Amino acid sequence: MKKIHFEVSMKKLIILFMLISISAAAFAVKFDPYWFKSRTIIGCFTTEAIPNIDGKLEYTIQDGVVHTGISSFDAIAREFDIVDIKQAHPYVKVPEWNDKGVYLQNIYRLYLKSDDRIDETVLALSKNKFMNFAELETINRQKFVPDDPMLAQQYAHPLMQSFDTWDYVTGSHDVVVAITDSGVKWNHPDLAGNVWINPAESPGMSINWEAGTING
């Protein structure tokens, strides 16, 4: 009975391990040019690979690929065509700072010849003992969603493409907007603090504007 119970338990463990492996493979991050930079991998070398505090890695380009003198890394570079390498943070002010052995100055951008095997390259580098980690470089995009509950009723924004613009900038007091509108009420609470009035022509004027003045 004990032998049968042991065999059943082992089968359950094997099945569980297979399910975990399949799930991990299914949810692994795959390269997508919309989300990740083309031909680029972010990798952090260990202090064993880069023993100096400045994070400087000596390398040359041999036969079109990176050669560092670290044999296992160089083998990956040859197999997957790593054609260039650049230090990501060369001006770290406190080089002694680290997060469990991860030093900013030891992080490099690795450039590949193509994207054809970029996922395989990340996996190979991640398994290398001289790398703390290797990952695809994310493309960061700004997204801005207004919290105005009446936004859906404001027809002008789709016409002006405001939503696309707000992903880049939401406004600035340094920007001067000129409005040609003879009916604007410049002393309205929403406008009074922002309306620009031509100081050369405004002295003595009231809300009853004179023809020919330039305000906005």
Image (cartoon, rainbow, N blue to C red):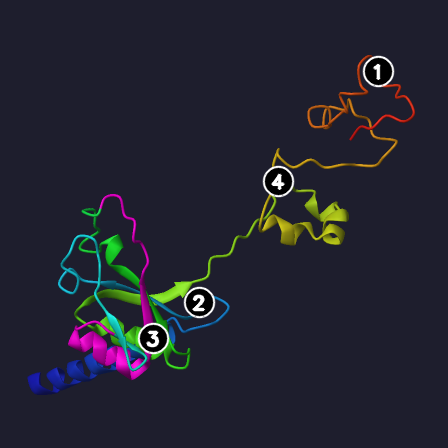
Disc 3 and disc 4: Cα gap in Å?
A: 42 Å
Asked if labels 3 and 1 touch by Cβ distance under 8 angstroms, the answer is: no
Name the residue that disc number 1 marks. 206
Query: Going 26% across and 44% down the picture, which residue do you hit?
Result: 93
As drawn, the label of residue 83 is 3
Vertical arrangement, residue 114 with respect to residue 143, above or below:
below
Query: As shown in the figure, which amino acid type bears the numbered disc 4?
Result: Gly
N-terminal of the two: label 4 or label 1? 4
Query: As shown in the figure, which amino acid type bears the numbered disc 3?
Result: Val
Residue 83 in the magenta stretch? The answer is yes
Between circles 1 and 3, the one closer to the viewer is 3
As drawn, the label of residue 141 is none
Query: As shown in the figure, which amino acid type bears the numbered disc 2?
Result: Lys
Name the residue that disc number 4 marks. 171
Q: Where's residue 34, x and y in %?
A: 51, 68
Numbered-mark total:
4
Is residue 188 shown left or right of residue 146? Answer: right
Query: Going 89% across and 19% down the picture, which residue do you hit?
Result: 208
Disc 1 and disc 2: Cα gap in Å?
A: 58 Å
As drawn, the label of residue 37 is 2
Disc 3 and disc 2: Cα gap in Å?
A: 16 Å
Residue 91 in the magenta stretch? The answer is yes
Is residue 115 shown left or right of residue 12? Answer: right
N-terminal of the two: label 4 or label 2? 2
Vertical arrangement, residue 209 with respect to residue 57, above or below:
above
Disc 4 and disc 2: Cα gap in Å?
A: 29 Å
Query: Going 37% across and 81% down the picture, which residue do you hit?
Result: 117
